Image (tube, grey):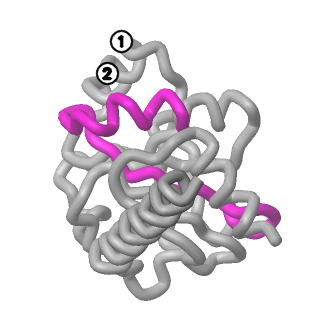
Amino acid sequence: MAKLRRWGRELLILLLIVLAVAFGMDWLRAPQPPAAFDSQPLTTLNGEQVSLAQLSQDKPLLVYFWASWCGVCRFTTPYVARLVGEGGNVLTVALRSGDDRQVEQWLAGKRVTLPVVNDPRGELSAQWQIGVTPTLVVISQGKVVQSTTGWTSYWGMKLRLWWAGL
């Protein structure tokens, strides 16, 4: 019994260390939104004009910065597409993934449907100081409330959106 308790304590300590490192990395790699980012007009691949303030007014918005060449994005993108399919409030930004046609072909090849703002030269992502793909940013009422980088599970995304809506 004492051995089991010791293992439990050491597992708890390991879990706390992993969480501290994960939160520390997110803090260090957090994107820095540009001034007046919420009102900047953005155009999606289907020609729709949107703004982050408008999209995040009624419920939290997940902004997903990804790239077709990103290995980790191949695992995260289907989760984002699942959120979109369920009616989730999501906008994605394709970072240096080619022209609009190439991004549409990549999405069709993966059989995913996403609302995408194409960033072929990385200018929008540079304004946000995105240094890691994927990067997920949660915006509520025009304000950045959370962000994370790297792989995130479907439930991690749902939890972040739910938490931001409280």
- Amino acid tagged 1: Gly
Residue at the spot 38% in from the left edge and 31% down from the top edge = 75
Q: In screen coordinates, is 133 left or right of 10? A: left
Q: Return the residue at label 2.
A: 106
Q: Is residue 126 magenta?
A: no
Q: Is residue 64 magenta?
A: yes
Does residue 117 show up?
no
Circle 1: element type = helix
x, y percent for residue 45: 45, 37
Residue at the spot 44% in from the left edge and 67% down from the top edge = 19
Magenta region, residue range: 55-80
**Residue 48 sits in quarter:** top right
x, y percent for residue 17: 37, 70
Q: In screen coordinates, is 115 left or right of 30? A: right
Alpha carbon of mark 1 to alpha carbon of mark 2: how far? 5 Å
Which disc, if any, is residue 109?
Answer: 1
